[in-house]
Image: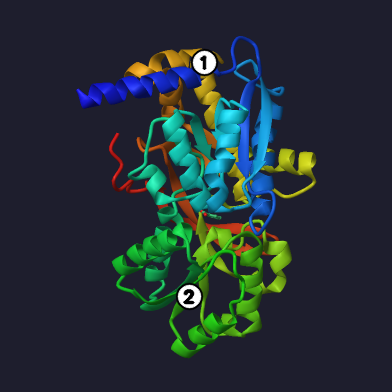
Amino acid sequence: MKTLLKLAAAAAAWGVAGAAHSQGNAPIKVGLMLPYTGTYAALGNAIENGFKLYVQEHGGKLAGREIQYFKVDDESEPSKGTDNVNKLIKRDNVDVLVGTVHSGVALAMARAAKENNTLLIIPNAGADAITGPMCASNIVRSSFSNWQPGYAMGVVAGQKGVKRAMTITWNYAAGAETVKGFTEGLEKGGGKVIKELTLPFPNVEFQALLTEIAAQKPDAVYAFFAGGGAVKFVKDYAAAGLNKTIPLYGPGFLTDGTLEAQGPAAQGLLTTLHYADNLDTPRNNGFRKSYALTYKANADVYAVQGYDAAQILAAGLNAVKGDLTKRDAMTAATKRDAMTAAMRKVVVDSPRGKFTISPAGNPVQDMYLREAKGNNNEFKAVAVKGLADPARGCKM
Ligand code: BEZ
C-alpha cells in the first residue's frame, strides 16, 4: 500500500514537471550548469563549446527542434549545487540538464534530477555513486566514472613494475575515487599504495606534500588534479626536481587542455584517458578541424564530452521525434520511456572512438595510454580495452 502511495505521489510530481515541457515546435530548453569561474572554468567552457558545435553542425536543431540555452555558473561549489540546479529546473523549466564538471556539484544535480524526473546528461563529473547506488534511467554520462581512468593507470603502473606508489589529490569524491581505481589496478599487478596525500579543493599549496614525497622516495606518484590546479601541480613537481627521479602518473586530466600553460614541465608525462588528441580517424580529425575553426582553440577531452552529450541527447530526441510530451506520458507508469531507453541504446560515434552506454548509464570505452608531446597528449597504446565501470550498488 505504502509503495502504491509512493508511486502515485511520484506520478503526480512527474505529471506537474511534464506539463512544463516544451510543446509543439517550441525550442527544446537545455540547461547548462557548468563552472564558468574558478579552477575548472576552462573545462566548463570547452564542454559548452563542444555541445554547441554538435548542435551547430545540425543546423542549430536536434530532431527538428530549435535549441534554447539557459546557463548557470556553478562555480564548482557543492554547497550551492541544489540552489543552482533548481534555478534551471524550477525557474527556467528546462527540458534537459547538462552538467557538470565537479563531482560534488554533480551529486546535488543528480539528486534533484531524480526527485523531479528531469533528464540529466553529465558531460564530465565522474562521481562513482551517480552510476552506482544513485543510478536512474533519466541520468546518463557522456564522460567516465572516476574509477575508470584511475584503474587503467594502476594497471599500466603495475605493468611497469611499480611496487610502492604514493598518491596526491584534492580531498573530495573525484580524488578519493580515482585513487581507489588506481589502487585496484596497481594491486592486480602486485604493487601497493604506501601513502595517500590530500589537500582541500581547490587549494594549490603543494610544497609540504612535495617535501613528503621526496622523503618517502616511492617508485611512482599518481596525481589527480585538473584545470588551473593541474597546471600549478605539474610545474611545482618539476620545479622541486621530482620529475627527474620519481615518475609522475595520472588520469589524463592532469595534462588535458593544460599543456600549453604547463610548458616543459609536462613533456613526457604518461596519463590514461578515453581520449588522445592525435587519434588519426576521420571522425576525430573532422571534429578537431571544425572545433579549431569555430573557436580558434584546440579541442580537448572536455570538448569531446560536451559534443558527445549533444549526440546522446539527439539519440533520445530522435526516438520520440522531438516530442518530449511522449516521455511524460510513459514515465509515470513505467519509469522508462522511448527517449531514455534510446539514450542507453545508442552507439556514440565519438571523436574518441565508438562507445556504448552501460545499463547504469556510463560509457563503456577504451582507455588509452598517452604521452605529453608538445601541445598534444599523444596516443601510445590501448591501456584497457572496452572498460566498463563496475557500477557497484546500481539496481535498475
Ligand atoms: C570531477 O570532479 O569528477 C572531475 C573534475 C575534473 C576532472 C575530472 C573529474
Q: Is residue 49 left or right of residue 346?
A: right
Name the residue at 44% across, 25% down. 340
Q: Specify whether residue 234 is in view.
A: yes
Q: Looking at the picture, how far across and down is residue 153, in whole percent?
A: 44, 63
Disc 1 residue type? Ala
Q: Label 2 CB, ligand 1: below 8 Å?
A: no
Q: Label 1 CB, ligand 1: below 8 Å?
A: no
Q: Specify whether residue 310 is in view.
A: no
Number of numbered discs overlaid on the protein picture: 2
The disc, 2 or 1, on the residue closer to the chain's N-terminal end is: 1
Disc 2 residue type? Val
Nearer-the-camera pick, 87 or 389: 87
Q: Is residue 10 above or below residue 392?
A: above
Residue at the bottom extreme of this rendering? 215
* Rendering quarter of residue 157: bottom left
Residue 221 numbered mark, or none: 2
Name the residue at 66% across, 74% down. 235
Image quarter where the N terminus lies is top left
What secondary structure is marked by label 2?
Answer: strand
Q: State which mark lies toward you, 2 or 1.
A: 1
Label 1 Cα crowd, 10 Å radius (few <14 / some 14-19 / many 20+): few
* Rendering quarter of residue 203: bottom right
Label 2 Cα crowd, 10 Å radius (few <14 / some 14-19 / many 20+): many
Nearer-the-camera pick, 195 or 183: 195
Residue 19 numbered mark, or none: 1
Q: Is residue 297 above or below residue 171?
A: above
Q: Looking at the picture, how far across and down is residue 159, in whole percent?
A: 38, 69
Q: What's the distance in space between the residues labelled 2 and 1, CA to CA?
A: 52 Å
* Rendering quarter of residue 52: top right
Image quarter where the C terminus lies is top left
